[in-house]
Each structure stands twice: as structure tokens, then as C-alpha cells.
Amino acid sequence: MALNRYLLHVSYIGTNFHGAQRQVVGTFPRKDDPSTVQGQLEIALKQLNSCNEPIIALSSRTDSGVHALNTTCHVDLFRANGLHYEPRTITLCLNKYFKKHEVPIRILKTFIVPNDFHCQHKAVSRTYLYRLGVINANALNLAPHLHLLPIEELQRCHFLCTDTFDGEKFKLNAKLFEGLHDFRTFMGRGSHELHKMTRRLVHRAEVLDGKSLLYGPYSWPSVMPGTCQDYKFYDVYVQATGFLYRQVRRMVASLIAVAQGKVSSSDIKLMLEVPSHRSWNDKIKTVPAHGLYLCEVEYSKRDRAAFRDSLDS
């Protein structure tokens, strides 16, 4: 039997998962863990009837409630006849299982990769998106706005109801995070561990005007005229070589605090220049997970050249 390694491109809605990484630990045979993305992937892979127990390696570990538009993982599979599984067969088999069992995971693409390829260690960058919806609290009464949150956006976007939000400050201050910085202050936990490497190179930190996921003539705000202009959407993109625990959510929270006038640009600079858990400004509240999406895990051109999407390629 020959070992064959496969790279899976995966998307999922993280609302009901307890994170991407499996939580149930133990010795062989491992117990199933349907509460995590990794656990569900391993359960689905058993449908292929490989000679080995499929064990997924994740490229990125997202928290509970975080979504993924396109992330990656790899798995080694042994087939009795020593041949490869056709990548398309793996994609179709897993998606058929997820659809049947109503699991919010989809396989976008499967590749055959070299046996020494590692989806986490070979990644050159990761890109996250945070979706923010700002509600103008002064436009109408506060209660109607809170009641009119569109169902299409439920657990897909973080909504902030405020009468003080400077969109230009929100956009301009994002650039403070670009470059090589020590992000220890922005760690959700572990900032006391002095041995931990907390320097990260941020290639991109950018805020763009966003839009709602609303669609169709019968959806909000079509049936609620006069409210659309009171909702402003922003997309915050952050691309880096890697991230610390809750780093992106704390970065976005800092930008929101600046836009609301709770902290200044100098406060953000201080947290970057004096990396410590003591430097975190208590006026800043970490934004919730449901607005965060892992968009892409990138690999070098050289590694991508070795990916095979069929047995004939």
C-alpha cells in the first residue's frame, strides 16, 4: 500500500461549531468529534473506506463561531490497491455526505500533493475578512433598528448601533497595523507567556465599503423603505503570514473604538510600540466571532505547481 496525500480546499459556516480544531482527544481508535470542523471532515472521509483512519491536519485553527470562505487542510489516505483516489471523487463524496447530514461544510476542490507537503507550514499568508454593519442610532428610534436586523445577516455580520462613528477614521487607522509588529498586546490569551513569538508581518490591513447579503424584491429593505441608508457596511481585510489568538478581532475592535472616539490613534500606536498585556486599553471590547471569515490560505507558486487536480494532470 502506498501513502497518498490530499489537499482539500474547504468552506464552512462556523456558527454551530466549537471551532475548527477537534476537541475530543484520545488514543487509537479516536472517538468521533462532530462538534468541530476537523471532526466532521474526518467522519466524512470515512465514507471513502480507506485502509487507515483519516486524520486531518489544518492549515488554520479558527475559533468557535468563525466562518471560512476558503481554507485548507490535508489528509493521508491508504487505498488497498495502492492507487490514488481521484480528487474529484473525494470532493463529491464528502459534499454528498455533508448535504445528506445537513452539515454546513463544503469541499471546494481537492488536490493530490507531494507526501512531504504540509498545509500549515507551507502557507505563505492568510487573509481574513471582518464584516461590520453600523446602524445610525439617531435616524429613527433605537428599538426599530434593533428589531429590523435582516434575517439574511443573522450570525454573518457584526452590527453596531451608535450615533458616533467616523468612517474615515475607521479606514485611515487600519494602515497602522501594516508592516512587522509585535502583536502581543492584541492576543486574546497567552500574552503573559514571554517565550511565545508574537511578531507578525501584516501585508495588508484595509477597510473597504461593504454591502449587505440581502437579495430579492421581498427582502429587507425592500419591504421597509427609508431604512437602507441608515445601515452602513464595512469590510475589514487583514492579510499576514500568521495570526495570534483573537488578533484580528482585537485589531478590528481597536479601529471601532477609534471611530467612536473612545481611544485615539496614539493609543493604538502605544499598544504596538509597547507590546504587553498591560498595554491593552480597557475601553476596547473585542468584537464577536460571527463577523469573521477566513478568506484564503496562500501557497507559493512553486508549491502550487506541484498540485494535481486529477490523476491525468
Image: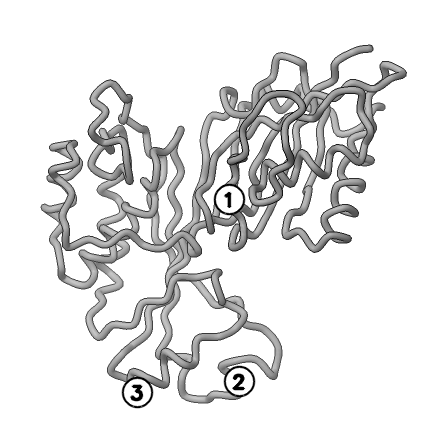
Residue 229 appears left or right of 305 = left
Q: Position of residue 268 (x, y in %)?
A: 16, 44
- Which of the labelled discs sits on residue 295, or is there none? 1
What's under tag 3, amino acid-wise? Leu
What's under tag 2, amino acid-wise? Ser
Dot 2 or dot 3, earlier in sequence: 3
- Which of the labelled discs sits on residue 222, or is there none? 2
Which residue is at the far right?
Answer: 81
- Please give the residue where the numbered disc 3 appears in the rendered image: 140
Dot 2 or dot 1, earlier in sequence: 2
Q: Please, what secondary structure does the residue beneath circle 1 have?
A: strand
Image quadrant containing the C terminus: top right
Q: Position of residue 201 (x, y in %)?
A: 32, 29
Q: Nearer the viewer, mark 2 or mark 3?
A: 3
Q: Residues within 10 Å of mark 3 (few under 14, many from 20)?
A: few
Q: How is the image coloured?
A: one colour
Q: Position of residue 82 (x, y in %)?
A: 85, 14
Q: CA distance from mark 2 to mark 1?
A: 29 Å
Residue depicted at 33% across the width and 47% down the height: 249
Residue nearest the observer in this picture, 136 or 146? 146
